Image (cartoon, grey):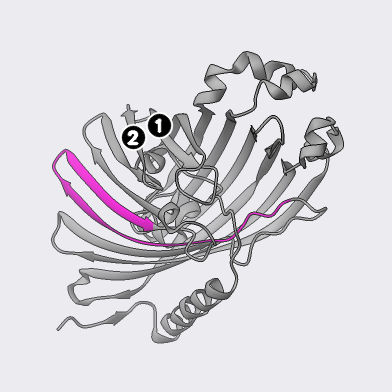
Amino acid sequence: MGQLDLDRGSVKTQVWCWTVVLFVVMSRVIWADASTPLLIGSDVQAMGGAVSAVADDDLSLFYNPAGLAGAKRFKVRFLNLSVEASDDLLKSQSLVNPLLAGQVTTSSIDALMGKNIYARAQEVAVASFQGLAVAAIGDVQGLINLSNPNNPKGTLGIQSTYGGQVGYGDTILRLGKKKGELRFGVAVKYLMRSGGVASPTSTDILTLNTSKLYVNPKVTGSGVGLDLGTQFVYRINNKLAVMWGLAVADLGNTAFTNGISPQYSNVTTGFGFSYSGGDVAILLAYDYQRVFDNIDWQLKNKVGIKIKLPLIYLAAGFSEFYPSYGLGLDLGFLSAAYTRYTEEQSVVLGVNPEARNMITLRSDFSF
């Protein structure tokens, strides 16, 4: 039988373990609808979004802070720029231009009926060392999703979010011979948010009631949020490992002042496998996300694989039962990636799928 080693004293371990129990209980009784992660990287998105168990680098700060226990080297990621656009936006840019110019007319609205217009730009800078990570994030996204010209309904708006996040992950329990480890992590964020997504009535849309068509982008709110996570990693040998993870993002919802829409809580659990041998590394992961959200259970499933080779990586998966895939080029100091995925805009699979494209540029150094 493997002997358990209590890292840094039994008192600390008991405190961490009771904290795990506490956040599991709290995450069960505090939940919300329509939770959307603040950050999903290009490789993770290509894997269908499955990451809670396999996160182990500086970006674990956003996925599962327990994974920061694997981020031991000093690393500075000063460029992590992602740009996204839906297929309908790429095909209908000329139809969107009038709205961007402030020309809100019946014809400009009608031209976008039945289309999923979505765009997002995001930059993240992260510094990490020995399980501690500090990050700054800026995110801007806009959408127009309207249908049924005779009795129109849908959502539209522009939302900006920016702020900072700090987190720490550590190993709190080890199995004999150090084959297995239990990790725990915590992250705190301070965010500023302006604008948001409006859901106007049919009358508001037909009468072009601009006060209801969008959320005032000049109103800004601030909020403080908490993320918690745990992972168990068992190394079968020096090449193969199995992992399990549980993460709660924005515990109890990250509320903003001035009536700005909150960042909703997202509870995720999953497992994964990793293989590393020579020049080849393989990740296989599954997540069950938005555990307590009142949505179609099929939308909660994420599964994917990532194969890392010299200079490139290939990734593919299924997000909400929709296929996703991506390709990345890594030159060391600079990397670039393309990802394609589909996201359901309804709470039921197959009602309103939206295909999206993501391009990411990254630059970092570590030692």
Confirm whether residue 217 shows in the render.
no
Residue displayed at 68% across by 50% down: 191
Residue 94 x %, y %: 63, 13
The amino acid marked with disc number 2 is: Tyr
Distance from Cα at disc 2 to Cα at disc 1: 6 Å
Q: Which residue is mark 2?
A: 325
Give the extent of the magenta segment: 261-287
On screen, residue 321 versus residue 21, left or right, reads left
Residue 97 x %, y %: 69, 16
On screen, residue 79 versus residue 245, left or right, reads right
**Residue found farthest to the top:** 94
Residue displayed at 57% across by 56% down: 166
On screen, residue 354 versus residue 238, left or right, reads right
Q: Which residue is mark 1?
A: 340
Residue displayed at 48% across by 41% down: 343
Residue 60 versus residue 48 in the image, above or below: below
The tag on residue 171 is none
Q: Nearer the viewer, residue 302 or 314?
A: 302
Would you say the residues marked 2 and 1 are in contact, meaning their CB atoms lie under 8 Å apart?
A: yes
On screen, residue 212 versus residue 125, left or right, reads right
Q: Is residue 272 magenta?
A: yes
